[in-house]
Image: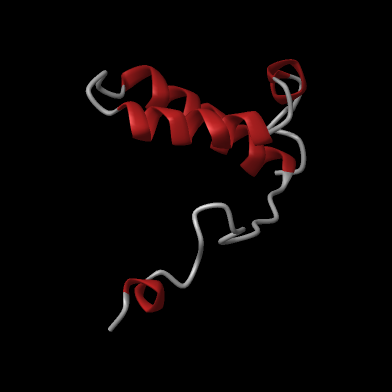
Amino acid sequence: MADEELHLIGPDDIAYRLDLTPSQLKVTHTALKSFLDDFGHDEPDVRAAVREVIAKLPDEHSIRAIDISRGR
């Protein structure tokens, strides 16, 4: 089997779309930031991928404004 057949999703292709509520978005952002802060310095590729995901989310001020107790 050729290598192209093993990689169905290219490195720059959209692999998944995810709809999140505001509360879920805040939890996701917080979890990613915590993961990035606690992750070892010997994994620069993982740290870069996490930073890329965080960059796709709304800015930190917008995330902080989300009240996760609302709507529960």
- Give 20 or 15, whichever is nearer the viewer: 15
Pick the residue in front: 45 or 29.
45
Q: Quadrant of residue 25?
A: top right
Q: Is residue 61 above or below residue 9?
A: above
Relative to 6, 42 lies left or right: left
Q: Nearer the viewer, residue 3 or 68?
A: 3
Q: Position of residue 4 (x, y in %)?
A: 40, 73
Which residue, as the protein is rendered here, is positioned at the far front? 2
Q: How many marks?
A: 0
Task: Identify the image's colour scheme: rainbow, by chain, secondary structure or one colour.
Answer: secondary structure
Residue in view at x 65 percent, y 59 percent: 17
State the residue at coordinates (46%, 72%).
Answer: 8
Question: On the rendered image, what quadrant is the N terminus found in?
Answer: bottom left
Place of residue 65 in the rendered image (x, y in percent of width and height, measured from the top left): 76, 20
Q: Position of residue 49 (x, y in %)?
A: 46, 36
Q: Residue at x 70, y 25 (%)?
A: 63
26 left or right of 44 in image: right
Question: Residue at image x 63%, y 29%?
Answer: 55
Position of the C terminus by quadrant:
top right
